[in-house]
Image (cartoon, rainbow, N blue to C red):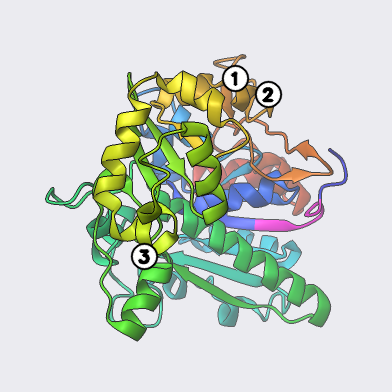
Amino acid sequence: MSNLPLKGIRIIAVEQYGAGPYGSMYLADMGAEVIKIENPKIGGDVSRQTGPFFLGDNDSYFFQTFNLNKKSLTLDLKSQDGRKIFEQLVASADAVTNNLRGDQPEKLGITYDKLKYINPKIVCGHLSAYGRDNDRASWPGYDYLMQAEAGLMSLTGEPGQAPARFGLSMIDFMTGAVASLGLTAALLGAHKTGQGRDVDVSLFDVALHQLSYPATWYLNEQYVVERAPRSAHPATVPCQLYKTKDSFIFLMAMTDKFWGVLVDLLNDDLLKGTRFAKVAGRRENRDLLTQEIDRVLCTHATAHWLEVFKGKIPSAPVYDVPQALNNRYVHDVKMVQKVPHPHNKDMEVLANPIKMNGKRLTGKASVEMGHNTQELLTELGYNQQQIDELKAAGTI
């Protein structure tokens, strides 16, 4: 696709591992030139060595997951020559983004105040654990810690069991996406006004924001949401897992209209009773309703009920990872794409969920560490002798 919306935007990414690279990959997928800075003294992004599955000497499937469509520049930002190269890039860039600890951007000189004299339009995005403006700025932090402290683990799992985290690092991914949104908004503002700025997003703030309506209920009514059996919605019934003859199915008949359709499809006299006719009655009789829906659904296998409910009642099977990825629908909508890699020409990854003009965004495998160093330094005016000297010094 040659007309991607961020084509011509240059972003310097001082990032590693998950949240930051996940967010900047969205920007790269939508056409931005994302230049990933990798420290040559530590082997680049630590996720290149995150197993258990590797692609050559310094690459992994984990790394590829978060770094499609990016360029790689090896650069020691703490060296004098490395800083010079970085500032030359800033002069030609639209944004600098990082996912460092909150006290590091100031120390590295990658804030707007430190870079505006080079490029007043530069946007500086900062994704950290706890932010840059409080007494936790120097604290390291990770996704699971945020789930714990923000109350999300208390809402996950079955009642009476230990608190549980989400199956994946969803706070990392949400924070990356929010950071890319904030950066894009600031880029739009800089394009209109000529004025850049800092944009800050933290894992903790995003995690807390995900409390959404339970937070609003507590802040205003002191109502505490607690875990309900079978991953049920705290207020709307039926909206949870139900037993079938061979497994489980998730049903969400969340309105009186859907309830009426469900009752007609199940055709059971007890479920047609007045005690279940309205939302309030179904909520007050949740346990009994669960028992009765189980009774009816257990007469047939999940596949049968999915066919019965198809397009009429919001419902879904409960798949494991292989079943989820082998789902015919996933392939029909082209959410899996091939991205050839030198060590696996048939490498497959999940496609970007955003479509442009009805088409999936395409991906290119992430390159080896430093793949674009020569190209970028040549663009900045360095000759081969200078490049060789920088490499010998460990700057690149």
Q: Earlier in the sequence, mark 3 or mark 2?
A: 3
Instruction: Determine whether label 3 and label 2 are within 8 Å by CB.
Output: no
Q: Nearer the viewer, residue 303 or 149?
A: 303
The residue that mark 2 highlights is 332
Percent coordinates x, y for residue 269 in the rendering: 40, 37
Give whichever of 192, 35 is nearer the camera.
192
The quadrant of the rendering that contains the N terminus is top right
Q: Judging from the image, what secondary structure is the residue with disc 3 in?
A: loop
Task: Report which residue position mark 3 lands on.
Answer: 129
- Residue 62 appears in which quarter of the rendering? top left
Q: Name the side, left or right, on which 48 lies relative to 13.
A: left
Work out whether 168 lies above or below 119: above
Label 2 neighbourhood size at 10 Å, few (<14), some (14-19), many (20+)? few
Q: CA distance from mark 1 to mark 2?
A: 6 Å
Q: How far is disc 1 from disc 3 in space, using C-alphas? A: 38 Å
Disc 1 + disc 3, Cβ < 8 Å: no
Q: Please state which amino acid type lies under the numbered disc 1.
A: Arg
The x and y percentages for residue 356 are 79, 45
Q: Is residue 291 visible?
A: yes
**Distance from the alpha carbon under mark 3 to that under mark 2:** 38 Å
Q: Which residues are magenta?
A: 5-11
- Tag 1 secondary structure: helix
Asked if the residue at tag 2 contacts the one at tag 1, i.e. Cβ–Cβ closer than 8 Å, the answer is yes
Query: Where is residue 79 shown, x and y percent of the image?
Result: 48, 60
The location of residue 71, given as percent across then percent down, is 64, 42
For the point 82% across and 47% down, the residue is 4
State the residue at coordinates (49%, 53%). Answer: 254
Above or below, 185 against 338 in this view is below
Q: Which residue is mark 1?
A: 328
